[in-house]
Amino acid sequence: MSRKLEKYIAKQPQYPEGFQYKTPILVSDSKGSTSCIEKEFPLETWCKSGATTEVLVDLIKNRIEKSIKRHQHVIIYLWSGTCDLTKKEGRYIKLKSHSKKSIQTINRAINIVSKYQNAEIKFIDCPLLSISNWNKYKGHKNPETYKVEDFLVNKQIQELNYKIYQNNSKLNKTSVKVSKYFFRGRKRRKGQIRKSVNLSINNKDGIHLGRLLSLAISKSILLDTYIECFNIDQNSELLQIRVEQDELNTLF
């Protein structure tokens, strides 16, 4: 499976014919620092390690005017959430109390961007994570005691992602769904499919993206920028991009 994925990632998507009339800007925490870093990718990145959604939205507010002057028309890809759900206790992390602050902050981002005629925003969903794997990686003697927190944090992530999909739909935007890579479907009797969660595609620390996952997500974002930012004249070219996306879905 890894070889198949590496082979797919190594094949760069065909650059769309037509002209680019929007500039995509990826705004993220450390996830963005390890993704979309190839010089060929037509992306500007505003990334801050450990940043919450609130910090990233403040970054958008402070930089958006200059970015519009520089690029004329921008579309912001906000990819956050991971740092909103956990908090540090020394070397270890634990689940924060459940709150709707992430959703409220996302709505604030929409309000900020909507003030500018030549700016758009869309949201990338939040990948799953493992608190117990992080604490094990950091040397905790009983990391299995955090298994319940694993369940709760990923339940919160799925609730957050559902709201992200709703917001993208209201903005007339498709969603870049990176969390789908963590789910595996297994066929059962009578054609039923039972989904299981695979957190091993993250790094051993349980939070940061694994190398192959990071590359696959980079390519998904790249393909989405082609659709969002280029005036594609031929239907066949748009079809090719969509076929690339469908193919990527089969690799995990």
Image: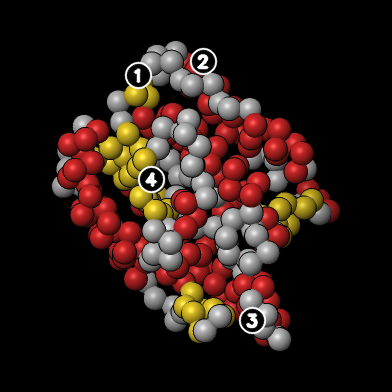
Q: Tell me the tag on residue 236.
A: 2
Is residue 124 shown left or right of residue 94?
Answer: left
Q: CA distance from mark 4 to mark 3?
A: 34 Å
Image mark for residue 45: 4
**Marker disc for residue 19:** 1
Crowd class of label 2 (few under 14; some 14 to 19; many from 20; radius 10 Å):
few
x then y, percent, for residue 200: 70, 60
Element assignment for label 3? helix
Amino acid at the residue labelled 3: Tyr
Say which of marks 2 and 1 sits in front: 1
Q: Which residue is mark 3?
A: 146
Q: Earlier in the sequence, mark 3 or mark 2?
A: 3
**Residues at discs 3 and 1 in contact (Cβ within 8 Å):** no
Q: CA distance from mark 2 to mark 1?
A: 16 Å
Residue shown at the point (43%, 41%) measured from the top left? 174
Amino acid type, residue under disc 1 in the picture: Phe
Residue 14 visible in the shown view = yes
First along the sequence among labels 4 and 3: 4
Q: Residue at x 67, y 73 (%)?
A: 137
Q: Indicate which disc, 2 or 1, sits on the residue closer to the N terminus.
A: 1
Q: From the viewer's perspective, is 28 left or right of 189?
A: left
What's the residue type where badge 4 is placed?
Answer: Thr
Report the Cα–Cα distance between label 4 and label 2.
30 Å
What residue do we see at 67% from left, 80% from top?
Answer: 139
Work out which quarter of the rendered image holds the N terminus and state it.
top right
The answer for how far apart the CA atoms under marks 3 and 1 are is 50 Å
Mark 4 or mark 2, which has the lower sequence index? 4
Residue 110, position in %: x, y? 26, 52
What is the quadrant of residue 146 in the picture?
bottom right
* Left or right of 59, for residue 128: right
